Amino acid sequence: MTLLARVSDRAWGWIGPISVAVLAFVLRVWNVGKPRILMFDETYYAKDSWSLLKHGYVQDFTENANKQIQSGHTTGLMTGDPSWIVHPDGGKWLIALGERVFGLDAFGWRIAAVVIGSLTVLVLARLVRRLTGSTVMGCFAGLLLAFDGLHFVMSRMALLDVFLAFWVVCGVACIVADRDWIRERLDHYRIIRPWQLAAGVCFGMACGTKWNGVYVLAAFGLLAVIWEVLARKRGIVDPAAERNSWVVTTLRVGVPAFASIVVVAGLVYLATWTGFLIHHHAYEARFGHGYGDYSAPWGAYVDKPTPGFLGETRDAFRSLWHFHVMTFDFSWSGLNTAEHHPYESNPAGWLVLERPVVVDYKGDFPLSDCGAGAGGSCVREVMILGNPIIWWSGALALLASIAAWFVTRNGRWGVPVVAVLVSWLPWFMSTDRPIFSYYAVAIIPFTIIAITLVVHELVRAAETPRHRYVVWFVAGFFLAAVVVSFWFFHPVLTGKITTYDAWHERMWFDRWI
């Protein structure tokens, strides 16, 4: 490849994915401020983020706060008591940035999700480009994510899961980039690895958004070590690796990786609790003497703080530890006894869209709003529903990826397989409490990677131009079907007022209602 061709390829490697991300942004930002209500768990995170913005930590809100906010009032909403937050503040601070710029309204608390969702499309496209060496394949993957209904709706709501998905995809992309980076530098060991440090930051932010990020951190931290150890022992480029045993090589690779990925992630995670650490006295006053059946007293230091700056720092971290224990115990005992929710689902059905989640439904509109005839009715619904064509074909692609990984031993097949497994299987430990299919928004980027790798492999296997034409035609037809499916379901993804019949024809299964 000539220098000009390489420059052109590198330029299109950015122009293409950025263009797809811009398209995703336009799709997501259009009318994102409607409906102008707090949908589903937005009632927690939009208000938590506003409290962080105003006070530096999350406070409880008054009982009528939702009505006040939806009517445009933003003052006198908080009680002054610290709230028992279940998730760290990393994702909520990003939501707060949107509220800081646009205010406490539907657009303000949702715009951060729009931006982050669109950036996820960009990062996914670049990741797939790296895995396949093809800008076209990268853009193909980005377009699939741009037109997936579940990711689309989650990118238009102030929930934390789309932020978790973004940081997880970024972390995995950094680990894959590190794999390529070190394979060009196997002549000796390198302790400081820029891509591993970046991965640590991303995984730290993932864990600082929701605790589920720790599973991906652990899995891809191990995978990074395994990839490098195998490269060193098989490549024999580094004389030290040839002399050393497998154990010594693993330690020489694993210890710096642990510091760069896990330790850095831990520090970033702690940074997301800065608001708690600064305002730990408020939490100690409310929770430190015991809190119902969920927490025993935290210790004598609550009433008699340790003197000095270092003493206060020690007390702050002790309180943070007790708060974690209290929250963890509640998550595994208190939430397990919570009442069932009509839209909860078993993770076994997530990959095939067995039970979507309705976050808003209203059916008392005038007939003129949707053009319904006599005897009809108008309805509005926002449903978190994935694109069936992507999800159903993606389940098959994941099975194909497992087989391809086993047969070829090529590590790129392991990326979607490992990421899906560690983002999905841990939820089976929580089936005795209400969990929802939209948690799978962290899974769909990697399902799309599996689809794209299968398509790319078919293109590579095509022996004649005619065969390649057939593969590209089928891939183009598949993408067109994805777009048509997206627009078909678009009214129930965006809360458009439609006739009841139009709504009902989109409810393909009873479990979707």
Image (tube, rainbow, N blue to C red):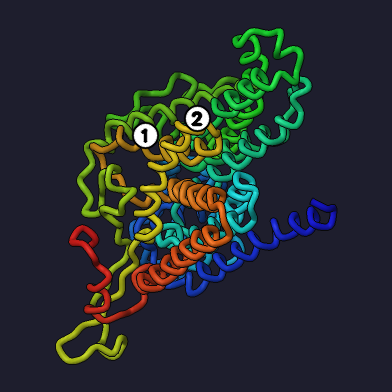
Q: Nearer the viewer, residue 247 or 115?
A: 247
Image-quadrant location for residue 334: top left
**Other-residue count near label 1 (Cα within 10 Å), few / some / many at <14 / 14–19 / ≥20:** few
User: How many badges with numbers are in the image?
Assistant: 2
Point out which mark residue 106 bears.
none
Task: Say which residue label 2 marks.
Answer: 219
At a point 61% along the width and 11% down the height, the residue shown is: 246
Question: As displayed, is residue 177 above or below residue 289?
Answer: below
Identify residue type, mark 2: Ala
Can residue 16 be seen in this snapshot? Answer: yes
- Give x and y (percent) for residue 219: 50, 30
- Give x and y (percent) for residue 117: 53, 57
Q: Nearer the viewer, residue 133 or 18?
A: 133
- Give x and y (percent) for residue 494: 40, 70
Image-quadrant location for residue 339: top left
Question: As displayed, is residue 284 above or below residue 88?
Answer: above
At a point 64% along the width and 9% down the height, the residue shown is: 248
Q: Quadrant of the C terminus?
A: bottom left
Q: Nearer the viewer, residue 206 or 284?
A: 206
Report the residue that reaches farthest toward the right.
3
Residue at disc 1, secondary structure: helix
Question: As displayed, is residue 294 above or below residue 147?
Answer: above
Task: Say which residue label 1 marks.
Answer: 426
Can residue 97 be seen in this snapshot? Answer: no
At a point 49% along the width and 62% down the height, the residue shown is: 470
Residue at disc 2, secondary structure: helix
Identify residue type, mark 1: Pro
CA separation in Å, label 2 and label 1: 12 Å
Looking at marks 2 and 1 on the same chain, the residue that comes earlier in the sequence is marked by: 2
Q: Are marks 2 and 1 in contact (CB under 8 Å)?
A: no
Q: Is residue 54 toward the left or the right of residue 442 in the image?
A: right
